[in-house]
Amino acid sequence: MAWAKPILKEIEG
Amino acid sequence: MIAPNAVPYLPRGVRLHRDHVRDRWVLLAPERTISLDMIGHAIITELDGSSGFAQIVDRLAAKYDAPAVQIAGDVQQFLGQLAERRFLEVRA
């Protein structure tokens, strides 16, 4: 897998 | 800004968890959850509580065969976002 900018997502209820 | 020798780590109460239902990795904290992509997961698994930021970047650069300067910038930003949300602490 190639490097890519990491993404995080906050999950809500 | 995380210094090269500073050690980023997951604080007590925060843990990496595999969400099998949605087929994704998440970081769990009390009453809060963050979902991670595969690169985010790769970064988190490098946080062993003893490695400095520069060591972590070097290992990721070797693993992904990518420029360390690019990885350092991306990891710095990613860990900064986690620290803002109190999913990460840094020991100087």
Image: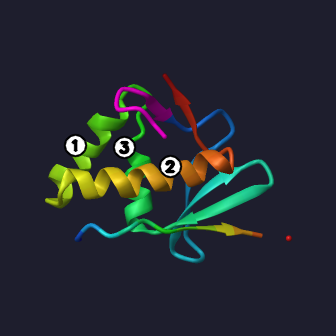
Q: Residue furthest bottom?
A: B22
Secondary structure of the residue carrying tag 2 is: helix
Determine the main secondary structure of the stretch shown in magenta: loop
Q: Residue at image x 48%, y 56%?
A: B78
The residue type indicated by label 1 comes to Asp
Disc 3 to disc 2: CB gap under 8 Å: no
Residue B61 in picture, x, y percent from top left:
20, 52
User: Quick one: label 3 or label 2, which is nearer the N terminus?
Assistant: 3
User: Quick one: label 2 or label 1, which is nearer the N terminus?
Assistant: 1
Disc 1 to disc 3: CB gap under 8 Å: no
Question: According to the image, label 2 marks what residue?
Answer: B79
Q: Residue furthest front?
A: B1
Q: Estimate the spatial distance between the alpha carbons at disc 3 and disc 2, rounded to whole Å.
A: 12 Å
The residue type indicated by label 3 comes to Glu
Residue B58 badge: 1
Secondary structure of the residue carrying tag 1 is: helix
Query: In which image quadrant can residue B21 be found?
Result: bottom right
Of B7 and B69, the residue lying toward us: B69
Please say whether residue B2 is one of the residues in the magenta stretch.
yes
Magenta residues, start to end: B1-8
Residue B46 badge: 3
Q: Is residue A4 left or right of residue B88?
A: left
